[in-house]
Every structure is written in structure tokens, then in C-alpha cells.
Amino acid sequence: MIEIKNLVKRFGTITAVDGVSFSVGKGEVLGFLGPNGAGKSTTMKMVTGCLTPTSGSIRVMEKDALAETIEAQKLIGYLPEGAPAYGDMTPHQFLDFIADARGLEDKKRAEAIERVVELAELKSVIEQPIETLSKGFKRRVGLAQAIIHDPPILIMDEPTDGLDPNQKHHVRSLIEAMAKDKAIIISTHILEEVDAVCTRALIIDRGRIVADGTPAELMARSRYHKAVTVIIAEPQAELARQVMRLQTNALGHEERSAGNGRIAFTLLARPGRTIIESLMPALRERGVDALEYTVEAGRLDEVFHTLTSHAPGEGKAA
């Protein structure tokens, strides 16, 4: 439904997006990740027709978004960074304005406004000036305007920014419910959001894609993939260390306090190996009681940091 090829955007001497290519199909929720200044928002602005690329191509449901910009924009719902709106309007007035801009008329317009007000849970503030709303409610007004014409494609820049935990859960549930019939791109800094709602994640750094895969595939790149964390009572700590040093499938272990006289040992697995099957019997054989244990899928934050951290002085895209 979206196909991006060799997308480039330069601002003077600065290359903000440098040869980005990817596609998004129906039913996919793509998490678009990257540090500040990586090129996420610039890419989204180009896909939505708000910014003209320096070079490259964008196709939206087979339409050339550069040659048929208005036709492509009709197919897209866009929640920009900061959810800009007219502050002196109420949410009802603003949504009526957006519905008019989207070409919705009479009964369809009223039904669309009623639908998105309920979906975004805006009834309690529907006649209150937007400038007086909390950041969370402003975000929800922005989400409502993005979906008012029920577009097949949704592009959202930080959709849960400023929302409390309950509101985040509601928006994530809404995204999941809409996903089966749409192609959705979400830019986010919240890594837990990727695991919660995204079917795929793409990491961009300094204007270039550095990783693309399912959340599970990305976490498999973590050094904590298949690591085992065991909670041990402190008096048994030295025995536990001896057992862990003998694990041939392990790269080594980390320790931290788990409070209440307990220590958490995290044993790292060699690539392609598992250690849980040998570790637990070995601990029991030495009389070490594992109070708790978990096998990790991996840590997305560690993968993100590895791929996007740079030595001091290295430049990044704007």
C-alpha cells in the first residue's frame, strides 16, 4: 500500500534522509524508530506530501505521490508531530472543518464526527476551546482528525505522546483494531509501544535505515537474547557464581542487587545456544535455590542503542 524507493531529502549541505527504501502492506503496523534528528519526521512529511523530496519515489496505493499528490493525500490520515490545531476552535468545530476539507458532506460529515469523537473519547471536552485542553486531549483531537475520513493508510508521529497510561492503552487498542484493514506507520520513542502494537519495526539513524524486521527478529539481535536471569539468596551467591562459570554455552554473567538480601544473576548465551536446560539442573545439583528465573527474548533498547549510538563528534542528520 506504501512503497518508498531511494528517498533523499537535503537541506542545503545537510542530508536529512539518505536513500531510504521500504514498503508497508495492508494489515501491517510499522514502528518507525530512531534518535532525535535521525530523519523520521522528515520521511513522514515526504510520504504525506507535506515536503517535496530531493530525489526518490513514493507510491501510495499505486498512485505516484509526487505527480498525484492530492489524490494520494486523500488516501492518508496524518497525525503530525505536536498535533497542531486551531486553538480558538473547539474540537467539534475543528473536526467539522477537517471533515469539510476532506469533502465529507451533510449526514456523512455528522456521522464521521460522531464516530471519531467516540473513538478518541472526546465527548467531555467537545465544546471546550482546544487551546485550553491538556496535552493528552490535544493529541486525541489530532488522532480524531487523522481518522475522520476512514483512510486506508495512517501515518502517525508519536501518537501516544502526552497520554497517561490508560489513554495510551486505549490508543494502542484502537490502532490494533484498525490495523487489519489499513497500512499504519507509527513514529515513536517509546520502545514498549513497538512490542505492544507493531508487527514490524524499522530503525533509522542519520538518515539511513539500519534495521528492519519484526520486534522478535530485532530482539534476537540483542546480546540478551536467550539470556537467563536467576534470583538467588545472597548467602548462596558464591556457589551460583561457580556454577555459572562452568556453563560452556554462556558468554559470561552480570550481577545486580534484587533487594531483600537477593542477587539477580543474568547469564548471557552464546549466539545460537541455549543455557536454561543445563543451568537449572546444575544449580540444583549444587544446592542453589533459584527463587525466580526468566528467559529473555532480548532487549530492544539495547539493540536500538547499539545501532544508533556514536562516538563523540560524529555528526547526525538533521
Image: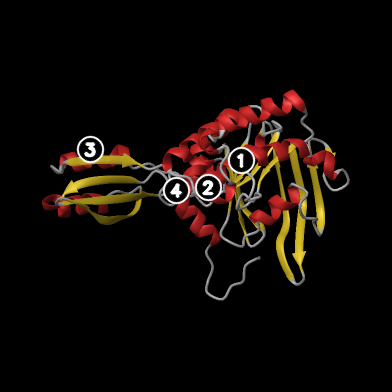
Residue furthest toward the left?
235
Task: Determine the residue positioned at 30% across, 46% down.
Answer: 229
Q: Is residue 260 visible?
A: yes
Say which quarter of the image contains residue 149.
top right
Q: Position of residue 17 (x, y in %)?
A: 71, 59
User: Crowding at label 1, few (<14), some or many (≥20) Cα neighbours within 10 Å?
Assistant: many
Q: CA distance from mark 2 to mark 3?
A: 58 Å
Q: Which residue is mark 4?
A: 271
Which callout, 2 or 3, points to the residue nearer the camera? 2
Question: Looking at this view, is 134 or 57 the one in front?
Answer: 134
Tag 4: amino acid: Pro
Q: Which residue is mark 1?
A: 91
- Label 1 sits on a secondary structure element that is helix
Q: Is residue 46 left or right of residue 294?
A: right
Task: Determine the residue positioned at 77% across, 55% down.
Answer: 51
Q: Sequence-wise, which precedes: disc 1 or disc 2?
A: 1
**Disc number for residue 133:** 2
Residue furthest toward the right?
67
Q: CA distance from mark 1 to mark 4?
A: 53 Å
- Label 3 sits on a secondary structure element that is helix
Tag 2: amino acid: Leu
Q: CA distance from mark 3 to mark 1?
A: 61 Å
User: Crowding at label 4, few (<14), some or many (≥20) Cα neighbours within 10 Å?
Assistant: some
Say which quarter of the image contains residue 228.
top left
Q: Sequence-wise, which precedes: disc 2 or disc 4?
A: 2
Q: Which residue is mark 3?
A: 281
